Amino acid sequence: MLATLVVALAFTATACAAGEAIEETAGSVAEQVQAGVEAVPVAANLACDADRRTLEVAIEAFTLMQGGPPTAEADLVGDYIREESPLFDLDPTGAIVPAPGSTCT
């Protein structure tokens, strides 16, 4: 009888420890998901900043090499950037502006 009681107590303690581990793991997963959700806007802002800076440098290089600023973003493709930015456009004055549908400012 005493042996049965010891085994029952050991099983109960193990089950509680396993349940606590599951709760801790679930909490940890929830925290990681929350951190990931919060990181999305930060990453988007970093992408905007990097894309804007790339265009600024390309426009500077184009202006120095060609003697004047580009009239369109397409003028930069090939020698100064690989492809047109999906986040920004150049307006008629050559200023960098957010592309339609872009979340960049």
Image: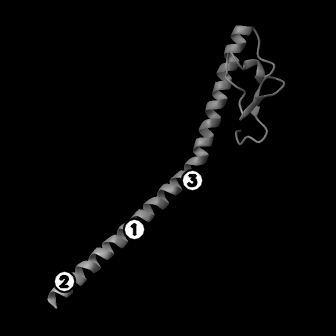
In the picture of the structure, the residue carrying the numbered disc 2 is 6
**Is 1 placed left or right of 35 in the picture?**
left
In which quadrant will I find the C terminus?
Answer: top right
Q: Earlier in the sequence, mark 1 or mark 2?
A: 2
Instruction: Determine the secondary structure under disc 3.
Output: helix
In the picture of the structure, the residue carrying the numbered disc 3 is 37
Q: Given the image, on which type of amino acid does mark 1 rest?
A: Ile
Tag of residue 22: 1
In which quadrant will I find the N terminus?
Answer: bottom left
**In front of the other: label 1 or label 3?**
1
**In front of the other: label 2 or label 3?**
2
| Figure quadrant of residue 94 | top right
Query: Could you tell me how far apart the alpha carbons at marks 2 and 3 are, in whole angstroms?
Result: 46 Å
Instruction: Determine the secondary structure under disc 1.
Output: helix
Mark 1 neighbour class, 10 Å CA radius: few under 14, some 14 to 19, many 20 or more:
few
Residue 7 place in picture, x, y as percent:
21, 82
Q: Earlier in the sequence, mark 2 or mark 3?
A: 2
Tag of residue 2: none
User: From what the image shows, is residue 12 above or below residue 90?
Assistant: below
Q: Residue at x 76, y 30 (%)?
A: 89
Rendered image coloring scheme: one colour
Q: Given the image, on which type of amino acid does mark 3 rest?
A: Val
